[in-house]
């Protein structure tokens, strides 16, 4: 069992929890994720790590309830426990594993959308701890949904907050800020965009115009998170990849977001999964217990 030490609402329908998981905290790096299960029969939910404290042996997760399992998570309080908390899974962000001297030469722009701000934070914090100040754009629908602003302001170079409705910070979506920064003469060597699929798609379309390499996190298409269910299959360039074992981070300019989003919709129905199996062969082999692929 994994004890929840702190639980609360960050903003709107977005929750934050600090969980006692010393083995995960000892080994994890930014970009990796955990699989969380509330109880024995619970669904396995992949969640990107938002923060970790190696000394305290804790992991911070941030989530938005979208189904019964995450709704159950949101009802847990400090003192309750998760049945399973498995990780760290997936590959860490390349920024944390590439040659540090090379990373230091890069001017990096992070683009964080909504709940996607949570997985951006540990990367920016890690860079800050290694002497690199990355710029960050945080986008939210409205003022009340901006998360981790204070935490990011302490570790980012420049922090640009924008809201879709203009109720706080700049006005407009994150892509507008990317364009505005470009017009203001800011140049970058690398962009990391994490948020809803549609945001990552349009960020990539925008950065392509500036020939700015852009890394995205394909966490939203994961289901079981262990390479078993086949849900997160995607084509990157001309290679077939699985977000949970080969990613979750990939070169966004090599991803066909429309195909990935269409596949995600198909995967949600039994008929759709059967069609995918017919089209793609046995990559969807079931076994996760909740995707229906083993029926
Ligand atoms: P949201 O819909 O509020 O969008 C956040 C921001 O993204 C907006 O404020 C806007 O600036 C930008 N955005 C949205 N649509 C855009 C478009 N068409 N063009 C340009 N920019 C656009 O986000 P939310 O409700 O907080 O997000 C929930 C989603 O985030 C879930 O679907 C979840 O899967 C995803 N998510 C992704 C990751 C990841 O690793 N990629 C991590 C956590 C959550
Ligand atoms: Fe990657 Fe299931 S989420 S195979």
Image (tube, helix red, strand yellow):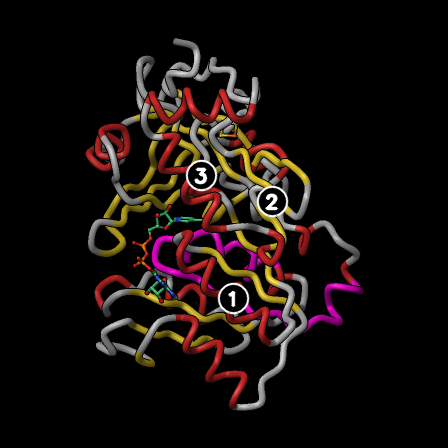
Residue 125 lies within the magenta run:
yes
The residue shown at (46%, 35%) is 222
Q: Which of marks 1 and 3 is nearer the N terminus?
A: 1
The residue shown at (24%, 56%) is 11
Residue 257 image point, x, y percent: 49, 51
> Tag 2, which secondary structure?
loop
Residue 269 image point, x, y percent: 32, 26
Q: Which of marks 2 and 3 is in front?
A: 3
Residue 205, disc: 1
10 Å neighbourhood of mark 2: few (<14), some, or many (≥20)? many
> Tag 1, which secondary structure?
helix
Closer-to-camera residue (155/147): 147
Residue at mark 3: 221
Is 162 positioned to the left or the right of 287 in the image? left
Residue 32 lies within the magenta run:
no
Magenta region, residue range? 101-126
Is 61 positioned to the left or the right of 135 in the image? left
Residue at mark 2: 29
Vertical position of residue 123 compared to residue 4: above or below? below
Disc 3 beta carbon < 8 A from ligand 2? yes
Q: Main secondary structure of the magenta part?
A: helix
Q: Nearer the viewer, mark 1 or mark 3?
A: 1
Closer-to-camera residue (178/264): 264
């Amino acid at each position: 069992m994994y004890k929840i030490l702190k639980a609360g609402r960050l903003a709107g329908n977005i929750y934050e929890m600090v969980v006692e998981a010393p083995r995960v905290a000892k080994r994890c790096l930014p970009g990796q994720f955990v699989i969380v299960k509330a109880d024995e029969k619970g669904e396995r939910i992949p969640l990107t790590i938002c923060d970790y404290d190696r000394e305290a042996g804790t992991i911070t997760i941030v989530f938005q309830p979208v189904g019964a399992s995450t709704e159950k998570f949101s009802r847990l309080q400090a003192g309750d426990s998760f049945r399973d908390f498995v990780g760290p899974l997936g590959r860490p962000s390349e920024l944390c594993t590439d040659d540090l001297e090379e990373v230091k030469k890069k001017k990096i722009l992070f683009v964080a959308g909504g709940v996607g701000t949570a997985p951006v934070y540990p990367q920016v914090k890690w860079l800050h701890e290694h002497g690199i100040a990355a710029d960050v754009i945080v986008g939210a629908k409205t003022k009340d949904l901006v998360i981790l602003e204070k935490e990011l302001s302490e570790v980012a170079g420049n922090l640009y907050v924008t809201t879709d409705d203009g109720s706080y910070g700049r006005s407009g979506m994150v892509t507008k800020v990317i364009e505005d920064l470009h017009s203001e003469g800011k140049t970058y060597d690398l962009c990391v965009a994490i948020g809803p699929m549609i945001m990552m798609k349009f960020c990539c379309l925008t950065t392509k115009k500036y020939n700015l390499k852009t890394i995205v996190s394909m966490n939203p298409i994961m289901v079981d998170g262990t390479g078993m269910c086949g849900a997160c299959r995607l084509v990157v360039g001309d290679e077939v990849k699985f977000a949970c074992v080969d990613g979750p981070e990939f070169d966004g300019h090599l991803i066909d977001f429309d195909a990935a989003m269409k596949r995600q919709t198909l995967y949600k129905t039994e008929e759709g999964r059967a069609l995918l199996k017919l089209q793609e062969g046995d990559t969807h082999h079931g076994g996760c217990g909740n995707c229906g692929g083993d029926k």
